[in-house]
């Protein structure tokens, strides 16, 4: 029993680290608010902070000990004001500096004055300490005033606080 509790505690810490700590990626292109040519798309950048709460979920009997499942609840503040709820699946390896996670998160709220929802896909990999994180909008997942949303999100942690930098495009109004 003690071994199971240790593994679950380790999995929780590892998943939390993976979900919010693997964020040294940068968006290669700088996007700024502008006007679209020919009424096509407007590129913008949204920044702010978020809080996240992870809750362990029961393991599948076939994958117990290898995969860990979590639900994630987020509260976004700043240019993106809303809530996110998602599911995460993480894989551990015998090496503490190698692991991976994937997550799908639905975000509902207001993005720089436009209301709606969209879905984010997270992919995080740690290869012997080298970290990479990709968070991207699932194509065609935007609703209401966010229909046509596309983009990527960087996540950083500074002094224990979580921040997002969301480079995105939307159809011009």
Image (spheres, rainbow, N blue to C red):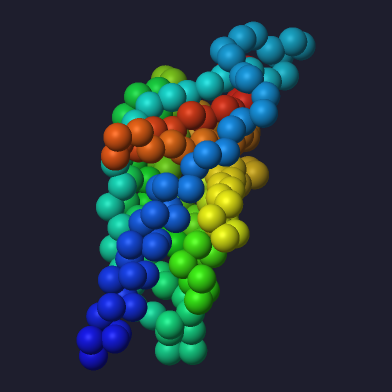
Q: Is residue 165 above or below residue 63?
A: above
* Residue visible at 29% across and 63% down in the picture: 55
The foreground one among 107 and 91 is 91
Spot occupied by residue 6 in the image (x, y as percentages of width and height): 28, 78
Instruction: Specify the farthest residue to the right.
Output: 38
The foreground one among 61 and 116 is 61
* Residue visible at 41% across and 70% down in the picture: 69
The quadrant of the image that shows the C terminus is: top right
In this rendering, position of residue 110 left or right of residue 148: left
Q: Quadrant of residue 115?
A: top left
Q: Quadrant of residue 172?
A: top right
The foreground one among 111 and 157 is 157
Number of marks present in the image shown:
0
The foreground one among 165 and 80 is 165
Spot occupied by residue 98 in the image (x, y as percentages of width and height): 54, 64
In this rendering, position of residue 2 left or right of residue 79: left
Visible residue check, residue 31: yes
Q: Is residue 128 above or below residue 22?
A: below
Spot occupied by residue 8 in the image (x, y as percentages of width and height): 31, 75
Spot occupied by residue 19 in the image (x, y as percentages of width and height): 43, 53
The quadrant of the image that shows the N terminus is: bottom left
* Residue visible at 32% across and 51% down in the picture: 73
Q: Is residue 93 above or below residue 140?
A: below
Visible residue check, residue 115: no
In this rendering, position of residue 88 left or right of residue 130: left
* Residue visible at 52% across and 46% down in the picture: 120
């Amino acid at each position: 029993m003690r071994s199971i509790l240790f593994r679950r505690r380790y999995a929780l810490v590892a998943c939390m680290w993976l979900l919010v700590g693997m964020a040294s990626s940068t968006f290669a292109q700088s996007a700024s608010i502008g006007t679209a040519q020919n009424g096509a798309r407007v590129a913008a950048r949204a920044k702010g902070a978020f809080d996240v709460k992870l809750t362990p979920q029961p393991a599948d009997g076939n994958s117990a000990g290898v995969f860990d499942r979590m639900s994630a609840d987020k509260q976004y503040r700043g240019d993106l004001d809303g809530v996110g709820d998602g599911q995460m699946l993480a894989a551990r390896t015998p090496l503490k500096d190698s692991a991976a996670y994937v997550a799908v998160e639905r975000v509902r709220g207001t993005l720089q004055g436009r209301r709606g929802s969209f879905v984010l896909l997270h992919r995080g990999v740690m290869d012997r300490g080298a970290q990479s994180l990709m968070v991207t909008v699932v194509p065609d997942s935007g609703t209401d005033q966010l229909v046509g949303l596309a983009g990527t999100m960087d996540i950083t942690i500074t002094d224990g606080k979580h921040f997002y930098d969301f480079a995105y495009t939307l159809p011009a109004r």
